[in-house]
Amino acid sequence: MELSEKQLEIVQTTKNKVVVMSAAASGKTRTMTARTEFLLDSGIAPSDIVVITFTNNAAQELLARLGKKPDGVHCMTVHAY
C-alpha cells in the first residue's frame, strides 16, 4: 500500500486522536486502514482502537481491508458510535 508523505505522517503520528478529512476518493479509507494496522503492529490493544467513519460503506470497506477483524477494534459510523 503506497501512501503519500502526508498520509504517512497521519499513519505514524504519536497523537492519540487523528481526524482525516479530505475529498472523495482521496485515500481516507486507505489512510485509516494503514493507521489501524500501524497501531496494532505497535502493540496497541485492539479494544483501545476506535475508527469512526461517515458511512457504513466506509466502515465495512475498512474492516474488509484489515482482513480478519482483530477482536475489539471498534469501527463504525459516528451515528453508530
Image: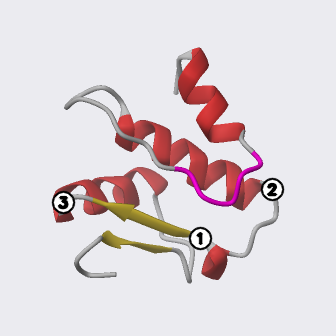
Residue annotated with mark 2: 42
Q: How many marks?
A: 3
| Disc 3/disc 1 C-alpha distance (Å) | 18 Å
Q: Nearer the viewer, residue 38 or 50?
A: 50
| 5 vs 24: above or below | above
Residue type, label 3: Thr
| Mark identifier at residue 40 | none
Residue type, label 2: Ser
Magenta stretch, main secondary structure, is: loop
Residue annotated with mark 1: 49
Q: Viewed as shown, does residue 42 lie left or right of 25?
A: right
- Characterize the local packing of mark 1: few (<14), some (14-19) or many (20 or more) Cα atoms within 10 angstroms: some
Give whichever of discs 3 and 1 has the lower sequence position.
1
Q: Viewed as shown, does residue 29 lie left or right of 50?
A: left
Residue annotated with mark 3: 55
| Disc 3/disc 2 C-alpha distance (Å) | 27 Å
Magenta range is: 14-18
| Disc 1/disc 2 C-alpha distance (Å) | 12 Å
